[in-house]
Image: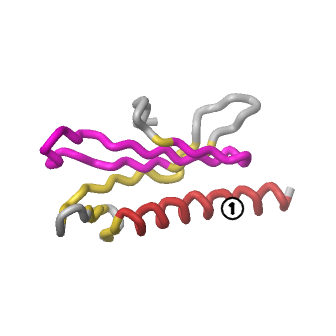
Amino acid sequence: MALSSNDDFRVSTNYGQSMQIGLTGFYMNCANTAELHALLFQTERFPARLAKKHSDMKFKPTFRRPKEVIWQCDAIKRTFTTKTLADHLLGKLTEQVEKQFAQDYRR
């Protein structure tokens, strides 16, 4: 997994689905190199295995108005406000949990 900073935000579920978000390349008064990385993956607790990556998305910040950040993802050709980006990422995590639940339920 690419992310491993102490500043990353990580959410894990009981179904082994995880999302890790981290801001890289951001410096005081300089956001030209900044990227928000969002990694969705699944881990198996027993036995411990390598994580299965679902998606690795990168978002670049742009600034429209004072204090308004717009996040652009070239891979999916979309832009997001901070709120809609949070909604999008939580939706992706929810989709993975639902897939895992359905798969476990069929067994």
Amino acid at pointer 1: Lys
Residue 6 falls left or right of residue 62: right
Which of the pair 66/17 is nearer the observer? 66
The quadrant of the picture occupied by the C terminus is bottom right
Residue at 84% over, 61% down: 106
Please provide percent x and percent y for residue 80: 34, 68
- Colouring style: secondary structure
Residue density around tag 1, few if under 14, some if 14–19, many if 20 or more, within 10 Å: few
Residue to which mark 1 is pinned: 99
Query: Quarter of the image holding residue 93?
Result: bottom right
Residue 93 falls left or right of residue 87: right
Farthest residue in the front direction? 66
Q: Is residue 68 above or below residue 1?
A: below
Residue at 63% over, 48% down: 17
Q: Is residue 25 found inside the magenta-colored segment of the image? A: yes
Q: Is residue 80 above or below residue 14?
A: below
Please provide percent x and percent y for residue 76: 35, 66
Please provide percent x and percent y for residue 102: 76, 63
Residue at 31% over, 62% down: 73
Q: Which residues are magenta?
A: 10-39
Residue 44 falls left or right of residue 4: right
Q: Is residue 50 found inside the magenta-colored segment of the image? A: no
Which of the pair 45/28 is nearer the observer? 28
Secondary element at tag 1: helix
Which of the pair 103/98 is nearer the observer? 98
Please provide percent x and percent y for residue 16: 68, 44
* Count of marks placed on residues: 1
